[in-house]
Amino acid sequence: MRGATGSTNAGAARATPGDMAALLDGSDEGIVLCDAGGVVLLANAAAARLAPEIVPGRPVPPQLDPAGSSMVTYGGRVIRVRTEAAGDHRALYLSEAPSLPRRAEFLLEAARRLFASLHPRRCARAAVDLGTEFLCDLAVVVLPPATNRRVEWIRAVAGHPGPEEGVMPLSTALRVPGLTDALAGLTHGSGGRQDAGAVPDWLLPEGFGPAVDLLVFPLPGNSVPAGAMALVRRAGRPAFDDEALAMVRDLASRAGAALSAASLFREQSAVNAILIDDLLPPDLPEVEGMRLAGRLRSSQQAGAVGGDFYDVYMSETGAGHDSGIGIVERPPLIILGDVCGKGARAAVLAGQVRQSLRALLLLESRPVQLLELLNRSLLASPAPNSYVTLVLAALRVAPDEHVLVDLAVAGHPPPLVLRRDGTVEEAPARGSLLGALKKTVVRPATVDLAPGEVCLLYSDGITEAFGGPTRREMFGEERLKEALASCAGMPVDALVERLEQISSEWLAGGQQDDRALLAVRAGGHDPATGTETGTATVATPGAMTVWAETTG
Amino acid sequence: MQDTPPLLVEYVTPEPGTARLVLTGELDYTTVDEAAEEADKVLADNPRVIELDLAGLRFVDSSGIAVVMNLYRGAEERGAALRIVALTAYLRHLLRVIALDDVFDLPD
């Protein structure tokens, strides 16, 4: 500001503080001077009008003190705020933004509230609230009837707290005139105007009084209606005018879009949940002569549940002889695998592999041949990306509480073997992934587990976990081997839990892929349960590893 | 890992009849679409030799392997040769685990 301050020319008039205050108060723009700490030093009349909380000596309400310029909502008004440096202080200039036309304001509010949720009922609640706030005294949304001939309804009444909701027989709901057509997507008359005298009792709460105007209209969805809505004005209010009818159309189209998005999302979530059940691991059964433990952790990325899975196939005891169809006798079998991709597609593929194997096992029990058959079935699959890696292990009980594990590996990291002396070996089994090559290579191996020794099947989600001190280093096979070595003598449940914990710590909250672990420990009892097979006997490392090699 | 684009796919033709895809970054579930698209373009152009330069790949997951396998099967159907011309130690290990090191003609 330019002006005369201090003594300049003798006789020149000087502005007094009173003049300054009058000058400031004459401005339509709110002007506030505050110190660096945000405490008000000076505020003009316009500022006090816009925000009565602006008082000298008190801090500026924080929402009115943005950095730079911005539009803020304060006390129901939209205020434009501009901040500027004023010497050591700061000046705020406030002006009320011209209020939006009611329809524009309604549209903004409708978009904000309707699309805030992907939950159909919450969308319906937002729609009826918008109705009673902007348009009418009572608003009801009826969601499309389910197959059981019942409908969900959501109702808001002006002046009543929160929407109510419930379920009623479709036939009762349809007493609302025009609702049958509205639920079928049809609108009649001007904006769906119906005879207000024909409003059924269920629509109006007690004491509402007579209705003077009733609109019933569809909420258009993507291809099918997302529901229908009824709006009522009670006695004493005018009928819906043209502006109101335009807003009703806005509400219908937006609520319909929001509801159909929410319904679609709910359906997809339900379908995903069903499919993902195929990826859930089974409860691990008791197997004579050994102990099993497993853990499966799914990816935390929403909608991207991955394709790790494991399963256990117990022997079909005795069934083969009676049925006469030559079902083969075989030892229990475990598999752990990883199908390509994530989400529903991965779940379908994992389910396909598990069920195919269940069928194949009725006729074939040799791991290598099983992999061959699975490969052929996947190659014949019309679905894209039907690639699977897995480990298949037949578990044979041998004398002296030993367990012979017949391993066939297809494109999967080979299992690790924890010996009683704490050394960790990689099983020498190898083979190509399934579903890709007409001619696969499988090199099986049999591992002899002495009592207390463990064979660990795992997925690459464990070794490829990015984390550690730099957060971008892979956990890797060497760390997994070290971790496993530290578990010597543990019960198999505790071992699997510990490995999972170590892997989680490595991730340290980082993004995790799927991780699967499945371990088998020879001997009927875990050390913790008392009879310590494997730790009580003299340690004779079960180093007898049987090799076999075939090329398929 | 946020510093650079997650995956760069370059389709170059070093000589007539040879198509080369150069992949740099991370080939995983979140990035495979682009790589798959380029792979389809390569197959559609019917080259005699398809070369994959994977020296710049830091990470590959099962979805990424699927892109490579689809390319392999597509090449096989068309009678084209698929060669991996460059790769990292990590990828060599990965291909060994899935036993594809014999299938692909890996560089030394």
Image (cartoon, coloured by chain):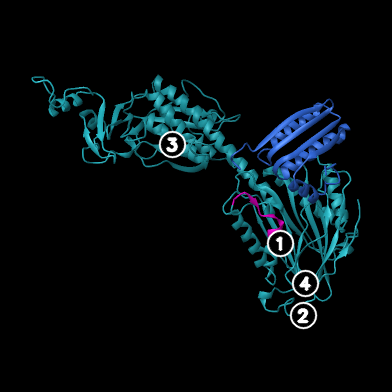
Using the numbered discs, state the Cα–Cα distance from disc 3 to disc 2 in whole angstroms: 82 Å
Q: Work out whether mark 3 precedes mark 2 in sequence or the reverse, and give the earlier one.
A: 3
Q: Colour of chain A?
A: cyan
Q: Which chain is blue?
A: B
Discs 3 and 2 carry the same chain letter: yes
The answer to whether the residue labelled 3 contacts the one labelled 2, judged by CB atoms less than 8 Å apart, is no
Inspect this view and state whether residue A375 appears: yes
Q: Amino acid at mark 1?
A: Lys
Chain letter belonging to callout 3: A
Chain letter belonging to callout 1: A
Q: Which residues are magenta?
A: A470-481
Residue position marked by numbered label 1 in the rendering: A481
| Residue A22, position as x, y percentages in the image | 16, 25
Residue position marked by numbered label 4 in the rendering: A289
Say what secondary structure mark 3 lies in: helix
Residue position marked by numbered label 2 in the rendering: A538
Tell me the residue at 42%/33% (across/down): A130
| Mark 4 or 1: the one toward you | 1
Using the numbered discs, state the Cα–Cα distance from disc 4 to disc 3 in whole angstroms: 68 Å
Q: Nearer the viewer, residue A316 or B25?
A: B25
Discs 2 and 1 carry the same chain letter: yes
Using the numbered discs, state the Cα–Cα distance from disc 1 to disc 3 in whole angstroms: 68 Å
